[in-house]
């Protein structure tokens, strides 16, 4: 699978750890930054990452910041994107199986690197289940269209 990964300065070290691990799992990873621990605007990183998904160059993305919350809020502003904060295995699984989430957001100040790797691996193993969830995801997309004007 081709993934895109991005972060802010608070999660730079976690991003580097995650990138290496995901490559070891056999996935291709596009790193869109940041590339150091200098202050940055996480909304710009989230927007750039989501563009890689909406243009079809990447299938899924992982956004990392202090808590994952700001990245998720920003990513969910991008039409067609479904992003979720995932800090436990059940939520990470359900984000993809039930909600067809393309972007997983995590916080470097909330979870340890080893657990973040476990969560990402589980998320990458999961696929959208469809079934009853497909109707719900379709409705989410309809609501999004209503507000796009």
Image: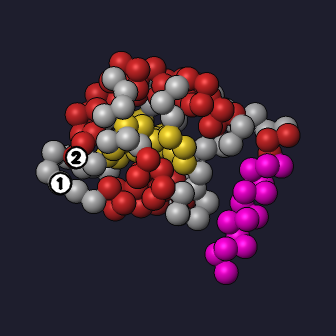
The boundaries of the magenta stretch are 135-149
In this figure, which colouring scheme has been used for the structure?
A: secondary structure
Q: Is residue 58 visible?
A: no
Which residue lies at the image location 55% right of the left edge and 23% below the top edge?
89
Give residue 11's quadrant in the image. top left
Q: Which mark is residue 120?
A: none
User: Residue 112, position in %: x, y?
Assistant: 33, 23
Going 67% across and 74% down the picture, which residue do you hit? Answer: 147
Left or right relative to 94: residue 72: left
In this view, the residue in front, 38 or 130, is 38
Give the residue drawn at x 45%, y 20%.
118
Q: Is residue 144 magenta?
A: yes
Q: Which mark is residue 39?
A: 1
Q: Are marks 1 and 2 in contact (CB under 8 Å)?
A: yes
For residue 101, say whether it is visible.
yes
Q: Residue at x 61, y 60 (%)?
A: 80
**SS class of the residue under badge 1?**
loop
- How many residues crowd around disc 2 within 10 Å: few (fewer than 14), some, or many (20 or more)? many
Q: Nearer the viewer, residue 104 or 20?
A: 104
Residue 113 x/y as whole percent: 33, 24
Position of residue 127 relative to residue 7, above or below, is above
Question: Which residue is the site of mark 2?
Answer: 9
> Residue 137 placed where, x, y %?
74, 50
Mark 1 nearby-residue class (10 Å; few <14, some 14–19, many ≥20): few
What is the C-alpha distance between the residues marked 1 and 2?
Answer: 6 Å
The main secondary structure of the magenta stretch is helix
Q: Is 72 in the magenta? A: no
Is 113 situated left or right of 128 in this image?
A: left
Q: How many marks?
A: 2
């Amino acid at each position: 699978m081709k993934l895109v990964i991005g972060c802010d300065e608070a999660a730079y070290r976690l991003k580097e750890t995650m990138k290496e691990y995901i490559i070891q799992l056999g996935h291709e990873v596009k790193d869109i930054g940041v590339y150091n621990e200098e202050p940055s605007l996480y909304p710009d990183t989230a927007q750039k990452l989501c563009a890689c998904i909406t243009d079809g160059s990447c299938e899924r993305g992982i956004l990392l910041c202090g808590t994952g919350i700001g990245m998720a809020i920003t990513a969910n502003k991008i039409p067609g994107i479904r992003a979720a904060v995932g800090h436990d295995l059940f939520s990470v699984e359900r984000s993809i199986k039930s909600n067809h989430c393309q972007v997983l957001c995590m916080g470097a100040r909330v979870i340890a690197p080893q657990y973040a790797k476990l969560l990402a691996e589980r998320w990458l193993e999961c696929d959208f289940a469809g079934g009853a969830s497909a109707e719900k995801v379709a409705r989410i997309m309809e609501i999004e269209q209503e507000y796009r004007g």
